[in-house]
Amino acid sequence: MEVQSIKSKIEGLEAVEYGIRCDLGVCKDLYHGTTKNIAYQIIKSGRIECGNTSSYLGCGIYCYLHDINACKIWVKNKYKNEPVTVFKLIANLGNVLFVDTELYKFLRETLRKIGKTSGSDINDDIGILIEEIIEDYIITEYEKDIHAVSRAYIIGKSTIRRPAIMYCLRYENRIKKFNIEPEV
């Protein structure tokens, strides 16, 4: 999607502007869950790499703010049949795009207008749209790179449902330190 088409077809880009928070600094309490096999590779290489595929909040390293239990719930649901572990991260969040309810509605409405309204890939489509807005609008219009994207949402299924805040760190060099947490 091109910026011109976003500007000409969509009213409400101010929702994007309101979501930008500049230079949030170092956060010492982020949690990232993964399989033990991947954790072994992380320990061996000494780095956590960003994923190339877009998901819920775009491309990057997904983690939970101040909430190891939310991370444990997520990782156990994601990798049901594999041993899992959790890393604690210290990261410089830098410039962050917060996807609040208004911005989330804007993103869904934008997808509806371009014909992508349903299906199992809707969250991936939102992530792709977030990436396009960052690259083609925020960097151009505001001359700011976004280092992380954040959203509050409800984690868990059935009886374990509660709010959590997720961050997607867009660049692995934002991580200053990480260590593996005790068994999940």
Image (cartoon, helix red, strand yellow):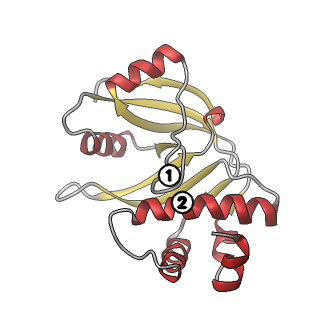
Q: Is residue 54 above or below residue 38?
A: below
What residue lies at 51% left-to-right and 80% top-to-bottom?
A: 109
Which residue does the numbered mark 2 point to in the structure image?
Answer: 128
Q: Is residue 121 above or below residue 116?
A: above
Asked whether 144 or 136 is in front, the reply is 136
Whether residue 11 is visible = no
Q: Is residue 115 left or right of residue 81?
A: right
What residue lies at 43% left-to-right and 29% top-to-bottom?
A: 87
Image coordinates of residue 18 in percent, x first then y, are 67, 70
Confirm or deny contact between disc 1 and disc 2 (CB under 8 A): yes
Q: Residues within 10 Å of mark 2 (few under 14, many from 20)?
A: many
Q: Is residue 178 left or right of residue 86?
A: right
* Snapshot quadrant of residue 12: bottom right
Which residue does the numbered mark 1 point to in the structure image?
Answer: 54
Quarter of the image with the N terminus is bottom right
Whether residue 20 is visible = yes
Image coordinates of residue 8 in percent, x first then y, are 70, 84
* Snapshot quadrant of residue 41: top left
Residue type marked 2: Ile
Residue type marked 1: Ser
Asked whether 46 or 111 is in front, the reply is 111
Image coordinates of residue 51 in percent, x first then y, are 51, 40
- What label sits on residue 134 in the rendered view? none
Asked whether 166 or 130 is in front, the reply is 130
